[in-house]
Amino acid sequence: MAPHHTPPAPIVVAPVEASVVNSAVYRDGCRIETPSNLADALRSLPDASSMAWIGMYRPDAEQLLAAAEQFGLHELAVEDAIVAHQRPKLERYGETLFVVLRAARYLDETERVDFGELHVFVGPTFVLTVRHSESPDLSAVRARMENDPDLLRLGPEAVLYAILDAVVDGYAPVVAGLQNDIDEIETEVFSGDPKVSRRIYELTREVIEFQRATRPLLDMLSGLSAGFEKYKTDEELQRYLRDVTDHATTVVERADGFRQLLGNILTVNATLVSQTQNEEMSALTQASYAQNEEIKKVSAWAAILFAPTLIGTVYGMNFDSMPELHWAGGYPMALMMMVLTCFGLYTVFKRRGWL
């Protein structure tokens, strides 16, 4: 009888809609439809003035490739979105903008900065956002835009600028949290906390990572500004972008200041640690010196007391042939030898500073 082989279980690929957290079609700044899939979203666009805004959360490679096929995204941009862990950047593929943003949020419970990643595809009639983390909260951005139809009717660029604004505004609590941590570290440094060096190092790493997330924003925003005339960007959006640029510049300057300040704090801490070690070594040296002085005194008195003991031991031996035993001046002579020996040793030790 032929053995029975169980066929392998088929690989189930989740549909692209499983990663879609929000999908809407807008016209003149108002939501006109909430399509159930990407194909319906594109078919629902009544004309070139309408826009589809699709939000995806942690899609796998197959889901993202399916979305890319629907929107006609460039394969290099899709590859970056699949791999993730990209540096913030702005790239243009034909009529589509590909934007990578690093969002950040400060966690009060652990006093740590949590970094997220967001990819945004912006086309003439669509915006596709791909989130790989909890932050930023794009539902708040969507609600804000839907409550401002005048801004939303400006199209996909308005959505991009609103996302940029949300990411940059999200840096403000991080800046405040880092400032508070630095203030605490300064207090710990001058209070002599031995664990502060490790905390300075960890906070410096967070500030460096924060710089990597924020500094590229200035070049990205500058690139968008350079295209105002070429792409006929609305004046309202130009003002909007300049405001975002101002906030981003402030954040970058604060991050640079934090890194320099932490470097100074680390230097001060090293100086204080070295000073403390020197003081401890000085105290140990003084204690050793005092101990040596006491040992000298003990040794000197031991030598002084040992001399008469030695003389007494010699004359305390019971030998009949010792000439001093029957001499009348033997006893006074022994005592005199003891006194003279002790006095001589005392004089020597006193001159050398041992007593």
Image (tube, grey):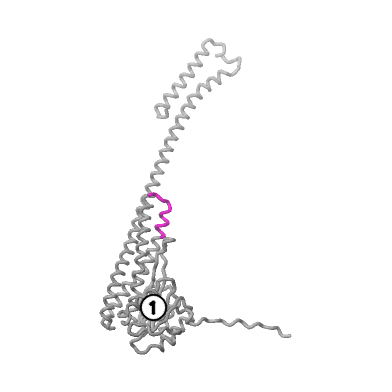
Q: Residue furthest top?
A: 328
* Number of marks in the rendered image: 1
Query: Which percent across, then down, holds residue 274?
Result: 38, 49
On the image, the x and y values in percent for residue 211 come to: 36, 67
Report which quarter residue 143 is drawn in. bottom left
On the question of residue 275 being in view, the answer is yes
> In the image, is 14 to the left or to the right of 143?
right
Q: Which residue is mark 1?
A: 120
Q: Quadrant of residue 3?
A: bottom right
> Does the rendering let one see residue 94?
no
Residue at point 74%, 85% (across, down): 1
Residue ID at (44%, 83%): 67
**The C terminus - image quarter:** top left
- Magenta stretch, residue numbers: 191-202
Decide which of 173, 230 is in the foreground and name it.
Answer: 173
Residue at 55%, 14% in the rendered image: 324
Compared to residue 132, the image places residue 196 above or below, namely above
Q: Quadrant of residue 86?
A: bottom left
Instruction: Assess whether residue 192 is covered by the magenta stretch.
Output: yes
Vertical placement of residue 315 versus 191, above or below: above
Any magenta on residue 140? no
